[in-house]
Structure formats: structure tokens, C-alpha cells
Amino acid sequence: MRRPTWPRHRVVAAALLAVGWAIALVVYVAASPVVENPEVEDLEHSKAYLRQTEIIGGKAAVLGNDLREWFDGLWHGQRLAFTIAAITAIVALVYYWWESTAPPAPRDG
């Protein structure tokens, strides 16, 4: 009885997911919680600071500052593990889609 074989792109996509999620799990377990300075945190989220930022740069500056803080937070502590897992899933899906839509290679012989 012959075992069915998976196409190579499925195996590679599954391997990418397994390795990436294993790394994310290690990072999640090993990461310590991010400790931020409460004085700086209170200053950056005070109404006076937000008002001054809005006066100087407008609402776009306030939004840009919020987006920058969110993006910077993705690369520290346990959030980094979720970032790695999400990037791994996206890369594996793109690889699987790319390879499954490619025309088959011509066979010699």
C-alpha cells in the first residue's frame, strides 16, 4: 500500500509554521513583563501633553504618536512572541499561496 505524499510546498509551509511558533513559544515563556516608568507614562498620556502635541502638530501628530507607541510595544516582552507568531503565519500563508498558484515545473524524461 502506497502512502500519499504531500506536495513539497505544504511540507515547507508546515515546517515554517512549526519553527516560527516554537520560537514564539520560547520567547513567550522566557520574556519578562515590560516594566515602564510610571512617571513617564503619566506624563505622555496627560491631557496637557496631548493638548500641546495637538497644538504643535495637529491631530495627525497625536495619532502618529499613538501609532509609534503601539508599534514600539510590539517588539518587547510577551508581545514580541505574538508578533513573531503573526509574522510566521503570514509568511507561511504567502509562501503556500505563491507555490500553489505557480505552474508546475516541466519534468525531464
Image: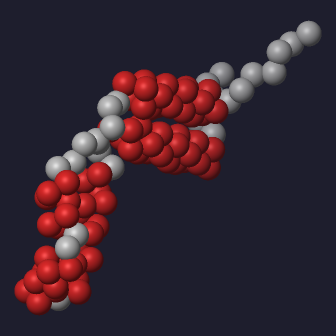
Q: Quadrant of residue 31?
A: top left
Q: Camera-side residue: 49 or 69?
A: 49
Q: Quadrant of the N terminus?
A: top right
Q: Quadrant of residue 38?
A: bottom left
At a point 23% along the width and 86% down the height, the residue shown is: 59
> With respect to residue 17, does 83 lie above or below?
below
Q: Position of residue 8 (x, y in %)?
A: 62, 28
Q: Camera-side residue: 88 or 62?
A: 62
Q: Residue furthest right?
A: 1
Q: Position of residue 85 (x, y in %)?
A: 47, 39
> With respect to residue 67, does 104 lie above or below?
above
Q: Position of residue 98 (x, y in %)?
A: 54, 47
At a point 25% along the width and 53% down the height, the residue shown is: 72
Q: Quadrant of residue 10?
A: top right
- Looking at the image, what colour scheme do you see? secondary structure
The answer to whether 1 appears left or right of 97 in the picture is right
Q: Camera-side residue: 35 or 2?
A: 35
Q: Quadrant of the C terminus?
A: top right
Q: Residue furthest left?
A: 56
The answer to whether 73 appears left or right of 25 in the picture is left
- Res 12 visible: no
Q: Position of residue 40 (x, y in %)?
A: 14, 58
- Res 39 visible: yes
At a point 26% along the width and 77% down the height, the residue shown is: 63
At a point 55% along the width and 27% down the height, the residue shown is: 18
> With respect to residue 66, does 56 lie above or below?
below
